[in-house]
């Protein structure tokens, strides 16, 4: 599909670009190497500034009692068919001042990290590492087939219409013969599933 051209090309990161977060509030989640994002954007769209670009709109800080957060707002641009896109927004954040076990920690890289976070937010709307965010991929294997693969699998698994019609007629005949032995809820289940899953109904009725 043309609309998913960029998405499908960018959605799955290689295992080497991923690292499982082992501590903190995000324990068990997957961290994606920012350099891979920039590389895959360059591979697909061209060098930064030529095929894709971004603009830092603003950076600012907001504080609480013991911590101060740094934020960044960016605009991402991609070139498609020789034309620049509308700005794709991204917001990100990091900690300037954090309360840790050994006391307060001040980060001199907080704004760089906030911009990196904002870029990841904007890029994932284009499809970058989308399978990770959607929960389809854990870094080594697919946990759920992505929608396009699910559709292909469903097409491959579709039964032959003639076989399906024969199975339906066989299920209908068997149900007619055994319906007196069924409880109301069992009969309702058979009726609800006989057209779509006739073989399942046959297997179920053969237990009686």
Image (spheres, grey):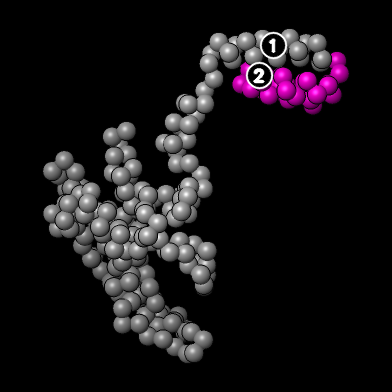
Q: Is residue 47 one of those drawn in magenta?
A: no
Compared to residue 197, the image places residue 41 above or below, namely: below
Question: Where is residue 7 shown, x and y percent of the image?
Answer: 33, 44
Query: Whole-percent x and y of residue 26?
Result: 50, 67
Residue 187 in view of the camera: no
How far apart are labels 2 and 1 at the CA level? 8 Å
Q: Residue at left 66%, top 19%?
A: 198
Residue ID for mark 1: 170
Quarter of the image for residue 83 reads top left
The quarter of the displayed image where residue 123 is located:
bottom left
Q: Is any part of residue 150 visible from this angle?
A: yes
Q: Main secondary structure of the magenta part?
A: helix
Q: Is residue 13 above or below residue 192?
A: below
| Residue pictured at 32% horizontal, 48% vertical | 10
Start and end of the magenta stretch?
Answer: 180-208
The one nearer the camera, 34 or 67, is 34
Q: Are marks 2 and 1 in contact (CB under 8 Å)?
A: yes
- Label 1: state its secondary structure: helix
Residue designated by label 2: 198
Residue 177 relative to residue 111: left or right:
right
Q: Name the residue furthest bottom.
A: 103
Residue 154, labelled with which disc?
none
| Left or right: 150 as drawn, with respect to 57 | right
201 is within the stretch colored magenta? yes
């Amino acid at each position: 599909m043309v609309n998913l051209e960029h998405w499908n090309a960018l959605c799955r990161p290689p295992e080497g670009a991923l690292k499982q977060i082992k501590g903190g509030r995000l324990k068990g989640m997957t961290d994606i190497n920012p350099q891979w994002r920039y590389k895959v954007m360059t591979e697909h769209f061209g060098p930064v500034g030529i095929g894709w670009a971004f603009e830092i709109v603003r950076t600012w800080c907001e504080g609480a009692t013991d911590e101060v957060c740094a934020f960044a707002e960016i605009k991402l641009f991609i070139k498609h068919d020789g034309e620049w896109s509308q700005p794709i927004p991204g917001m990100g954040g990091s900690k300037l001042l954090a309360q840790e076990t050994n006391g307060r920690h001040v980060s001199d890289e907080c704004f760089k990290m906030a911009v990196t976070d904002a870029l990841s937010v904007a890029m994932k709307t284009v499809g970058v590492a989308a399978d990770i965010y959607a929960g389809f991929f854990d870094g080594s294997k697919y946990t759920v087939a992505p929608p396009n693969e699910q559709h292909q699998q469903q097409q491959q698994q579709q039964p032959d219409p003639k076989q399906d019609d024969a199975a339906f007629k066989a299920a209908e005949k068997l149900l007619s013969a055994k319906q007196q032995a069924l409880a109301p809820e069992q009969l309702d289940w058979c009726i609800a599933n006989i057209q779509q899953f006739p073989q399942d109904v046959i297997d179920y009725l053969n237990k009686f």
